[in-house]
Image (cartoon, rainbow, N blue to C red):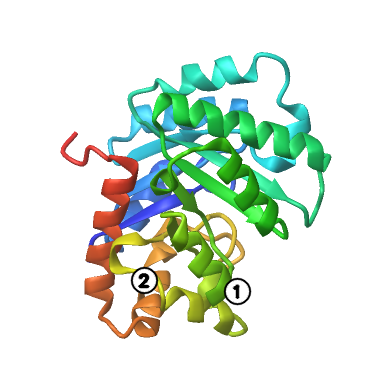
């Protein structure tokens, strides 16, 4: 199987040395990685990692947790980072009303501003939403960004939420959460995703999947477990699901795999 981990935080010190982490994942069949980011500084480090490793790509964005710290001029800096030859998306961005680490009005403003930037730059977007699904959809709708440029990362919605995401033309990505024993509702939604709109990830170093959930530091190599569980849910083989999700990731993020 050839797999792509479309969302892993390689800038996190727990995933160090990065070269060793990538090597272990490569042995498991992971051929490419998208280093997701949450802050401006984080995005700059991700660009550096992508520059050093040919199989790594990067994003640039301000996570809702850090929205209050975006600072003046952050959009100009994001635009500079998005121009990096290995940058493939704006993200992860969105709304998180579970922790409310940033005021909700600030989260909405920063999210909307980044969506506008992504639309202007014609970049896809990796969206984080937690306990804010309705408002996330509302901000996306108000932005006017094309639905097919949106990826809901580490999606935890059930069938109803899944249908609404599909209705706007978005892609859906699943992490280790979809393998958890109490995630039947999430898996019911995953069964509905068309073959050409499902993507997988680890969100490493978070969310270790079953059967390695006790692994305190998740690694990109564990994306294989996500593929295997979703294949069973979708009544296909892991090899077929790997082929589908890899093709979808290449198309959505416009990955230049030859380079």
Q: Label 2 crowding class (10 Å Cα cut-off): few <14, some 14-19, many 20+?
A: many
Q: Residue at x 35, y 39 (%)?
A: 56
Alpha-carbon span between mark 2 and mark 1: 18 Å
Nearer to us in this view, 161 or 186: 161
Q: Quadrant of the N terminus?
A: bottom left
Residue 111 visible at all: yes
Q: Quadrant of the C terminus?
A: top left
Q: Is residue 166 left or right of residue 213?
A: left
Closer to viewer: mark 2 or mark 1: 2
Q: Identify residue for label 1.
A: 214
Q: Identify residue for label 2.
A: 227
Circle number at residue 62: none
Q: Label 1 crowding class (10 Å Cα cut-off): few <14, some 14-19, many 20+?
A: few
The percent coordinates of residue 196 (x first, y second) are: 29, 62
Nearer to us in this view, 111 or 212: 111
Q: Residue at x 27, y 40 (%)?
A: 255
């Amino acid at each position: 199987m050839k797999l792509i981990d479309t969302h892993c935080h390689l800038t996190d010190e727990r995933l160090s040395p990065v070269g060793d982490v990538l090597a272990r994942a490569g042995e498991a069949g992971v051929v490419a990685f998208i280093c997701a980011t949450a802050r401006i500084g984080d995005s700059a480090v991700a660009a550096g990692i992508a520059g050093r490793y040919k199989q790594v790509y990067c994003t640039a964005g301000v996570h809702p947790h850090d929205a209050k710290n975006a600072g003046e001029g952050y959009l100009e800096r994001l635009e500079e980072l998005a121009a990096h030859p290995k940058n493939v998306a704006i993200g992860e961005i969105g709304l998180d009303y579970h922790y409310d680490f940033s005021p909700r009005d600030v989260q909405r403003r920063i999210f909307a501003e980044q969506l506008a930037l992504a639309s202007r730059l014609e970049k896809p977007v990796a969206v984080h939403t937690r306990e804010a699904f309705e408002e996330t959809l509302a901000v996306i709708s108000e932005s006017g960004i094309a639905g097919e440029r949106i990826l809901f990362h580490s999606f935890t919605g059930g069938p109803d939420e899944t249908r609404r995401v599909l209705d706007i033309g978005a892609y859906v990505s699943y992490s280790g959460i979809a393998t958890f024993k109490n995630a039947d509702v999430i898996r019911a939604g995953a069964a509905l995703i068309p073959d050409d709109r499902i993507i997988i990830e680890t969100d490493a170093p978070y969310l270790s999947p079953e059967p390695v959930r006790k692994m305190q530091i998740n690694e990109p190599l564990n994306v294989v477990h996500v593929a295997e569980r979703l294949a069973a849910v979708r009544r296909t083989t892991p090899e077929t699901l790997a082929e589908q999700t890899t093709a979808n990731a290449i198309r959505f993020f416009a990955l230049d795999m030859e380079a």
